Image (cartoon, rainbow, N blue to C red):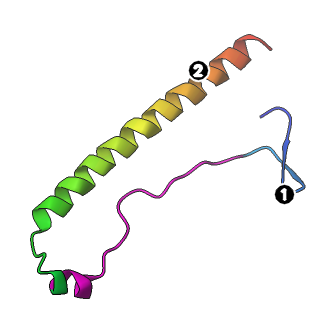
Amino acid sequence: MYNPIVINRKKTFDVQFYTEAGLPPEDLVDRRRRGYDDDFDEEEMEKIQRKKLNKEFKAFIMAVNELVIYFINHI
């Protein structure tokens, strides 16, 4: 950034974005009570979730990249 932005009443030049990837942890005791011992479905759900997050992150990066190129060309 050429000009700082204000975050929590402080000027900053660097900003990072992040997200938690993956599914929340599961209580193993509760899982045994329900009789759910098949990990295959859970692993498939994690793969699908990971692919979805990767796709969304890539789209976000491409959008930011386009904005950066636009602003560089118009300064």
Counting from the top left corner in percent of width and height, residue 19 is at: 51, 53
Query: On residue 66, which mark appears?
Result: 2
Q: Is residue 58 left or right of residue 34?
A: right
Residue beneath the point at 38% across and 68% down = 24
- Describe the element under mark 2 as helix, strand or loop: helix
Residue beneath the point at 55% across and 26% down = 63
Residues shaded magenta: 15-32
Q: CA distance from mark 1 to mark 2?
A: 27 Å
Q: Earlier in the sequence, mark 1 or mark 2?
A: 1
Mark 1 vs mark 2: in front: 1
Counting from the top left corner in percent of width and height, residue 20 is at: 47, 58
Mark 1 belongs to which amino acid? Asn
Q: Quadrant of the N terminus?
A: top right
Q: Quadrant of the C terminus?
A: top right
Residue beneath the point at 17% across and 87% down = 33
Mark 2 belongs to which amino acid? Glu
The residue labelled by disc 1 is 8
Residue beneath the point at 9% across and 69% down = 38
Q: How many residues crowd mark 2 within 10 Å: few (<14), some (14–19), many (20+)?
A: few
